[in-house]
Image (cartoon, helix red, strand yellow):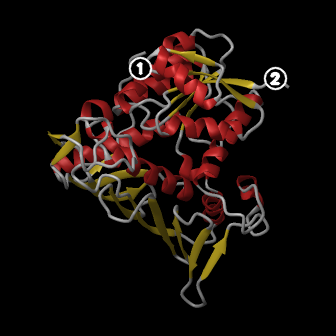
Amino acid sequence: MNKIKVGIIGTGFIGPTHIEAIRRLGFVEVVALAETSKEAAEKKAAELGIPKAYGHYREMLQDSEIQVVHNCTPNHLHFEINKEIILAGKHVVSEKPLAMNSEESAELLALAEKHGVVHAVNFNYRQHASVQNLQVLVAKGDLGKVNLVHGNYLQDWLLYETDFNWRLAPEVGGKSRAVADIGSHWCDTVQFVTGKRIVEVFADLATVIPVRKKAKNSIATFSTQNTEKQEYEDVPINTEDYASVLVRFEDGSRGVFTVSQVSAGRKNRLSFEINGSQSSVFWNQEEPEKLWIGHRDRANEVLLADPCLFTADARSAIHHPGGHNEGWPDALKNMMLNYYSFVRDGKSLKTDKPKFATFEDGHFSMCITDAILESHQEQKWVKVQTAKEVLT
């Protein structure tokens, strides 16, 4: 069987994680990458063992061997590059956010559907084995009627005033930061699990550190580089470090979540609790093999990830026996496995239901973010609007 040939655009933090996950599949091959210059591309290609290196992504899009392209670039480039990937006739996997606003994401969704490409957005947390299993349990009614959903996504990588990254600049990262960057993951995950869309929001956002010190010498994201001898310049910050958002779901159930990138000790803590009429459940991404199940009239439980204990519909999401814990890289692998199996089998998004997030999910995520920003500005409940004028 001929392997599916893949090209990667952007090799910062997330690009190499895509490559690693793809290589674990066996029937997909990363044959090329594109960077900001030929020199940078060749250096990274040599490090990662990739045969072709392009100094501009447009050169790579002309490579007829490549069937799928991953867009792993900074946020402000997503719209333009995604659009060109589609117009080049390639299938596309985009990092989130899909675009800078919901007008752009609506255009991308319409364009992808028009050209019949297989499109995906990397909402990888829904791909955790325990989350997949929980989605089946909720759908079966094991929790009863879902009444409340609450949780948070907390990080500390921007805790200090000397922490700086391109995501802090609105012209590069977008008008929203914490909500668009990590809040989007929380919303996608709980909507996937409950099967209910968020339709209305009331938001409170805050910039905890209004002025940051940007190092004159570049420091990479999540770097442990010594900063004691660095020289800095002051940079005003206009995007949120923190947000709390009340949400209403389409069936009338309620929820609330908090996101923060300035919470000391919290590295990547996406967590949520669902309170049903019969039982509750709690899941924390930093301990992904555990699912807490709460009861009123009997002892609470902790269900450990184990294919022997999972529902039949969720067993394909776990790849090792119980006790061989699977985590963040495995969820990403599941995303790639589901996507590339769909491509390999010649399926179409017009007729077949995917087991991964598509541009439709990415567009809806942008609509939620837009509503949250409007709600904070107007200090009122705002409905999530999905009907946008699309120019194609």
| Dot 1 amino acid type | Glu
User: Where in the figure is residue 272, as x and y percent of width and height?
Assistant: 47, 65
**Does the image show residue 222?**
yes
Front-lying residue, 223 or 248: 223
Residue 99 picture quarter: top left
- In the figure, is residue 41 to the left or right of 77? right
- Distance, label 1 to label 2, CA atoms, is 30 Å
User: Where in the figure is residue 160, as x and y percent of width and height?
Assistant: 25, 55
| Dot 2 amino acid type | Asn
User: Where in the figure is residue 344, as x and y percent of width and height?
Assistant: 76, 29
Residue at numbered disc 2: 2
Residue occupying the point 17% across, 53% down: 379
Q: Quadrant of the N terminus?
A: top right
Picture mark count: 2
Residue occupying the point 70% across, 34% down: 340
Is the Cβ of the residue at disc 1 closer than 8 Å to that at disc 2? Answer: no
Q: Is residue 264 above or below residue 118?
A: below
Residue occupying the point 44% across, 35% down: 363
Q: Quadrant of the C terminus?
A: top left
User: Where in the figure is residue 113, as x and y percent of width and height?
Assistant: 56, 24
